[in-house]
Image (cartoon, rainbow, N blue to C red):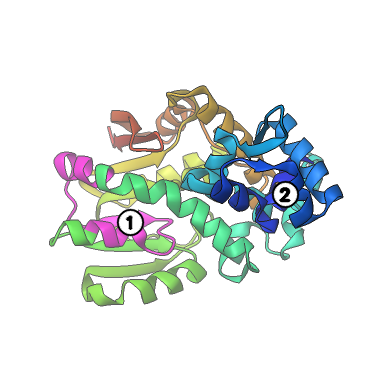
């Protein structure tokens, strides 16, 4: 109820009005929104810590209220929960029991959300991509610098390349890098359009990584960013085995993820752990945000060797793991 109350404050413009007016008498809010609406929202907001009210009835935004308006991460998370997760969350129990994303049926009949990304209705579509890109985009420059130092980027397979943002960042940074995006046909179609200017430097392989479809071969680097959290432990092991088989001699696999156990702040670990339930209910029914310890376990089970790791990278505390064949 608090979440929906805050959502109503945002839709009605109440938070923005308080931001503009600093401290606003409750009577002014009653005049603007109606006494009942103003009272229930102010009382909800004050007790939830979103609003402040002084002894004279002056209402203002708390720090949380300001974050809801001004902090991009807060807004993207809020919109993602509101537009993508909220309606389907009612079916979390069914998803846990069945191992399938029972809540996804509020949008369509796809087996997972990934087949339906290009067809999601608005505003769910924009909120999904806004949430996804916020985190990965901020991390790309630092990751590319580390990869440039520790690997050969002449032929990079971007597995789960999505709309092509990493491929663009890499090819703009390195004039010699070539990228093959390995992804589902729907996502590859969007990436083809977005990356047309790079010509032959960027190629595409329409592959469902869970199928028996062959991967291209000869990668100097296989890059998987915020991708393996879309799969179960067992599926990750199989995907890593396929990635290993696609490597050229001396090649590396780079895994980029926000690991629960490598967060500097307790609230970040909390958010990731709760975010796992999105995967349960809406995405695929069987994946989550992982710990670095469990991802290392997957790496070993796939017959790979961890080479080195970097943690707490960038604004959103990403980790980067480099792995290779023994």
Q: Using the image, determine if residue 169 lies above or below residue 263.
A: below
Quick one: 61 or 206, which is closer to the camera?
A: 61
Q: Residue at x 35, y 47 (%)?
A: 138
Q: Using the image, determine if residue 214 lies above or below residue 147.
A: below
Q: Quadrant of the N terminus?
A: top right
Counting residues from the start of the chain, the first of labels 1 and 2 encountered is: 2
Q: Residue at x 48, y 44 (%)?
A: 71
Residue 28, disc: 2
Can the viewer see residue 16? yes
Magenta span of residues: 143-170
Q: State yes or no: residue 303 in magenta.
A: no
User: Which type of secondary structure does the marked residue at label 1 adopt?
Assistant: helix
* In the displayed structure image, the side of residue 100 where residue 242 appears, left or right: left
Q: Using the image, determine if residue 14 lies above or below residue 143.
A: below
Q: Quadrant of the C terminus?
A: top left
Name the image quarter holding residue 64.
Answer: top right
Q: Nearer the viewer, mark 1 or mark 2?
A: 2
Q: Residue at x 78, y 54 (%)?
A: 31
Residue 135, given in percent of the width and then of the height, sits at 43, 46
Task: Estimate the spatial distance between the alpha carbons at disc 1 and disc 2, rounded to whole Å.
Answer: 49 Å
Residue 22, given in percent of the width and then of the height, sits at 56, 43
* In the displayed structure image, the side of residue 19 where residue 325 appears, left or right: left
Quick one: 115 or 52, which is closer to the camera?
A: 52
User: Which type of secondary structure does the marked residue at label 2 adopt?
Assistant: helix
Q: Which residue is mark 1?
A: 166
């Amino acid at each position: 109820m608090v979440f929906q109350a805050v959502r109503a404050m945002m839709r009605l413009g109440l938070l923005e009005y308080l931001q503009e007016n600093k401290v606003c008498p409750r009577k002014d809010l009653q005049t603007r929104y109606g006494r009942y609406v103003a009272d229930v929202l102010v009382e909800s907001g004050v007790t939830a810590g979103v609003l402040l009210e002084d002894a004279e009835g002056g209402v203002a935004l708390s720090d949380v209220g300001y974050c809801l308006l001004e902090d991009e991460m807060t807004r993207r998370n809020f919109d993602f929960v509101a537009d993508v997760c909220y309606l389907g969350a009612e079916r979390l129990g069914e998803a846990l029991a069945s191992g399938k994303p029972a809540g996804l049926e509020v949008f369509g009949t796809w087996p997972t959300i990934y087949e339906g990304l290009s067809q999601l209705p608005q505003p769910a579509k924009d909120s999904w991509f806004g949430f996804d890109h916020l985190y990965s985009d901020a991390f790309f420059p630092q990751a590319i610098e580390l990869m440039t130092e520790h690997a050969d980027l002449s032929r990079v397979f971007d597995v789960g390349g999505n709309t092509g943002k990493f491929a663009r960042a890499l090819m703009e940074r390195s004039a010699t890098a070539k990228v093959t995006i390995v992804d589902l046909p729907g996502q590859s179609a969007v990436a083809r359009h977005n990356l047309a200017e790079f010509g032959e430097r960027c190629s595409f392989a329409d592959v469902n990584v869970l199928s028996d479809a062959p991967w291209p071969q000869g990668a100097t680097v296989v890059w998987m960013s915020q991708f393996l959290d879309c799969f179960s432990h067992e599926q990750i092991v199989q995907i890593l085995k396929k990635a290993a088989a696609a490597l050229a001699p001396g090649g590396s696999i780079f895994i980029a993820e926000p690991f629960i156990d490598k967060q500097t702040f307790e609230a970040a670990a909390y958010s990731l752990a709760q975010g796992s339930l999105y995967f349960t209910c809406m995405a695929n029914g069987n994946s989550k945000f992982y710990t670095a310890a469990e991802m290392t376990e997957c790496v070993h089970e796939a017959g790979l060797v961890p080479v080195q790791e970097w943690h707490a990278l960038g604004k959103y505390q990403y980790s980067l793991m480099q792995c290779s064949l023994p």
